[in-house]
């Protein structure tokens, strides 16, 4: 018998509608002590999955709202258990009073992610789908949401299931021959599985290859804005952010530390880092900022190098250019493109150079297009992109196990030695789907969730 848990699933902000969610064997009876149907009938007798009108009362029995509730009997619910949702007006005071009354009536507070954890434990979804739920909640772009939604509906599981089945067939055939030598079972020959193992390894390798794009899709692109002091870095960040996030003055060295802001450029989320102007300075505080700027450059996915094109290159410009010259992804913005140019593309050792103006907005469209092209703005977002670090690590270990098994095949190791690596790969894949995952890992996964989901 499962305990009844309850939580507000719509947050604590004021909204038009607020939802209190319950799940557990007694949830309809407990909710019925707080929610009274307008026709006086028990909530448990309400038509399944249909909203019914009633009143919500607090712990003192006072009516606090006229609202609606919906009862969904298990197993045809999100959690696989009986569930109730009370849909009230979205006042935090109403929701808090209703929740308190439910606790006093026998429900207990839900832990973080406990609704989805029950759905997983009750077989309503595999672990890839469960983990995708929080990714869907936290998605910052339509593309990230679409990929997470694809994984919620089982896109990742569908890719992994055939591989797991192949490995299962191999192991079961071996053990069948070993355990039942007198039965009419085809002889077990490892070489018959060589092609399948190669195909499985290629499939896992292809999936791992999407992880870099997945990280960008999930967390955005780390973009460091660099250049000499007073070249327009902070003005660019303010322009992209849409408000004055950073103080801008004509005094060089105003920005003394890295400043971060998240913006959307085209279809790509940028984690912008406005850095202190890079130059030699005797100011101890500014020097610390310059050092942090150099560190930001090392850790960035892309560096946005700003150069004042209205004046000739200075030693400070040349120092920053030297710092960026060996980097893989650099976008040069020749700022003050509205003025007579003293620096042109031919003066710089970079492929991607855009004439730009933080004052007029010139070049902003080309900049957005460049970012999208550089970071796969047209990549498929159907759930086939791997975004989860835990899943990536498990798939990597599964791939390594299959590769060791293939190597064992090539050097004609005994079947039981090869199968040790195959079973290792299966166990690692089970950590992705939840087939073999340990309880401590399961608990850690659902701690990422918000209360009420």
Image (cartoon, rainbow, N blue to C red):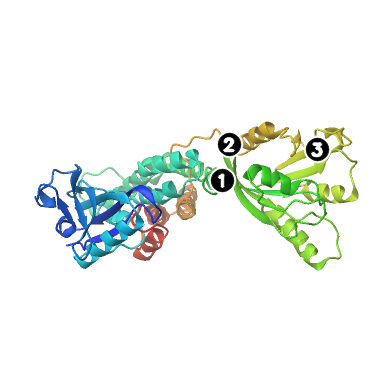
Please name the residue that numbered disc 2 is placed on.
376
The one nearer the camera, 182 or 377, is 377
Residue 243 coordinates in the image, percent (x, y):
64, 46
The picture quadrant where one finds residue 195 is top left
Camera-side mark, 2 or 3: 3
Residue 25's place in the image compared with 45, above or below, is below
Residue at horizontal 85 percent and vertical 51 percent from the top: 319
Answer left or right for 184 relative to 344. Answer: left
Label 1, on which residue?
216
**Circle 3 Cα neighbour tier, 10 Å, few/some/many (<14 / 14–19 / ≥20):** many
Do the residues under discs 1 and 3 have CB atoms within 8 angstroms?
no
Mark toward the start of the polypeptide (2 vs 1): 1
- What residue does disc 3 label? 336
Give residue 202's position: percent from left, percent from top. Answer: 49, 41
Distance (Cα) linking label 1 and label 3: 30 Å
For the residues labelled 2 and 3, say whether their Cβ atoms are less than 8 Å apart.
no
**Residue 5, horizontal then vertical, whole percent:** 25, 61
Can you see residue 135? yes
* Earlier sequence position, callout 2 versus callout 3: 3
Closer-to-camera residue (392/4): 4
Q: Relative to the observer, which residue lies in front, 204 or 340? A: 340
- Bin the neighbour count of mark 1 within 10 Å (Cα to Cα): few under 14, some 14-19, many 20 and up: some
Left or right of 349 on screen, residue 237 = left
Q: Is residue 283 shown above or below 310?
A: below
Residue 159 shows up from this direction? no
Query: Mark 2 and 1 residues: CB-CB less than 8 Å, in contact?
Result: yes
Label 2 to label 3: alpha-carbon separation: 29 Å
Q: Residues within 10 Å of mark 2 (few under 14, many from 20)?
A: some
282 is higher (above) or lower (below) than 179: below
Q: Which sits in the foreground, 437 or 124?
A: 124
Q: How far separated are the C-alphas under marks 2 and 1?
A: 9 Å
């Amino acid at each position: 018998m499962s305990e009844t848990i309850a939580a507000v699933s719509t947050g604590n902000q004021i909204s038009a509608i607020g939802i209190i969610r319950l799940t557990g064997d007694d949830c309809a009876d407990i909710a019925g002590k707080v929610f009274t149907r307008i026709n006086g009938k028990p909530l448990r007798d309400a038509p399944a999955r249909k909203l019914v009108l009633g009143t919500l009362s607090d712990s003192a029995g006072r009516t606090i709202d006229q609202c609606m509730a919906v009862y969904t009997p298990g197993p045809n619910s999100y959690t696989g258990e009986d569930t109730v949702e009370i849909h009230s007006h979205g006042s935090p005071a109403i929701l808090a009073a209703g929740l308190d009354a439910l606790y006093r009536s026998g429900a207990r507070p839900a832990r973080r992610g406990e609704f989805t954890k029950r759905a997983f434990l009750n077989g309503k979804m595999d672990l890839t789908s469960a983990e995708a739920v929080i990714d869907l909640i936290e998605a910052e772009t339509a593309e990230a949401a679409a990929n997470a939604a694809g994984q919620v509906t089982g896109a990742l599981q569908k890719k992994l299931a055939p591989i797991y089945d192949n490995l299962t067939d191999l192991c079961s055939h071996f053990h069948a021959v070993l355990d039942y030598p007198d039965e009419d079972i085809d002889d077990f020959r490892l070489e018959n599985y060589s092609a399948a193992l190669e195909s499985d390894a290629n499939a896992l390798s292809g999936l791992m290859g999407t992880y870099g794009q997945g990280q960008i899709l999930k967390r955005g692109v780390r973009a460091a804005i660099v250049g000499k002091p007073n070249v327009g870095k902070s003005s660019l960040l303010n322009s992209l952010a849409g408000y004055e996030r950073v103080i801008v003055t004509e005094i060089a060295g105003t920005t003394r530390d890295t400043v971060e802001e998240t913006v959307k450029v085209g279809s790509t989320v940028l984690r912008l880092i406005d850095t202190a102007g890079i130059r030699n300075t005797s100011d101890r505080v500014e020097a610390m900022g310059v050092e942090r700027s150099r560190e930001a450059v090392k850790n960035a996915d892309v560096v946005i190098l700003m150069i004042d094109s209205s004046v000739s290159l200075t030693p400070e410009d040349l120092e920053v250019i030297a710092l960026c010259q060996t980097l893989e992804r650099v976008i040069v913005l020749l700022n003050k493109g509205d003025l007579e140019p003293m620096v042109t593309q031919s003066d710089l050792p970079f492929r991607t150079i855009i004439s730009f103006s933080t004052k007029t907005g010139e070049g902003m469209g080309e900049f957005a297009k460049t970012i999208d092209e550089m970071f796969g703005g047209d990549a498929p977002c159907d759930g086939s992109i791997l975004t989860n670090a835990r899943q990536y690590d498990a798939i990597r270990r599964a791939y390594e196990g299959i590769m060791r098994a293939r190597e064992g095949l090539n050097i004609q190791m005994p079947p039981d030695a090869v199968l040790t690596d195959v079973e290792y790969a299966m166990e690692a894949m089970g950590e992705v789907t939840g087939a073999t995952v340990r309880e401590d890992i399961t608990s850690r996964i659902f701690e990422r969730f918000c209360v009420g989901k």
